Image (cartoon, grey):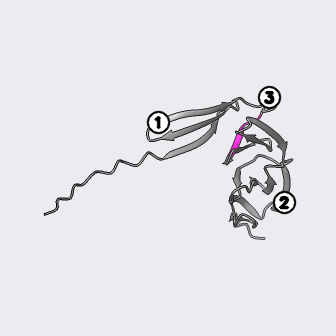
Amino acid sequence: MVALLSKKAPPPPPLRENFVVTNKTGELFHFSIAGNIVKEISKIPPETTMTKAVTAIAWKSDHVVLGRNDGNISVWDLSQKESRTVSTMRGSIKKIRFAPGKGNMKIIILFEDGADIWDARRLRLVSTVICPRGHFSKLKTPDWASSDRPCDFDLEWNSRGH
């Protein structure tokens, strides 16, 4: 008779999650969580030009994009610990999303009246969509159709009769 010895497999290592947050003074914090252990990975001081509140954050690879209520965007390169800021010449930024695909650094920036697509690596405007006033009460939830395709939007239609 053969006796089978059962060995308990060691438990898998805890999943590791990373996230970035900012405080009201503009400091950027990068944290890592594994199981029940939280570690501060890095802290980046606020930019000297930052005077408005951060309203949106997106992170991909070594780049974090911050959108502000004055319409400015800042792209932080975490590996180089440097940032660049540019004005979108639009209003308050509601949301920012990176396009899918490795190395694709295009972002969509959602405003109250439309959206812009920017190349975050070069900080250049690629495309703009502006909705006429009164046609939509809100643009919300921007998303990419694919890494090289235009975006999809969920729209809340304005129910006013014309």
Label 1, on which residue?
37
Residue at the limit of the structure toward the left, as seen here:
1
Name which residue lies at 70% across and 51% down.
95
Name which residue lies at 84% across and 60% down.
127
Q: CA distance from mark 2 to mark 1?
A: 42 Å
Q: Nearer the viewer, mark 2 or mark 1?
A: 1
Specify the label residue 127 is tagged with.
Answer: 2
Which quadrant holds residue 65?
Answer: top right
Q: CA distance from mark 3 to mark 2?
A: 29 Å
Q: Is residue 134 above or below residue 31?
A: below
Residue in the foreground of this view, choosing between 4 and 96: 4
Q: Is residue 103 magenta?
A: no
Q: Nearer the viewer, mark 3 or mark 1?
A: 1
Label 3, on which residue?
48
- The local secondary structure at tag 2 comes to strand
For the C terminus, give its image quadrant. bottom right
Residue 134: x and y in percent read: 78, 62
Name which residue lies at 85% across and 54% down.
125
For the N terminus, give its image quadrant. bottom left
Residue 154: x and y in percent read: 67, 64
Residue 54: x and y in percent read: 71, 39
Label 3 is placed on what type of residue? Thr
In primary-sequence order, the first of circles 3 and 2 is 3
Per the rendered image, the range of residues in magenta is 52-57
Residue 148: x and y in percent read: 75, 65
Q: Is residue 70 above or below residue 144?
A: above
In primary-sequence order, the first of circles 3 and 1 is 1
Label 2 is placed on what type of residue? Ser
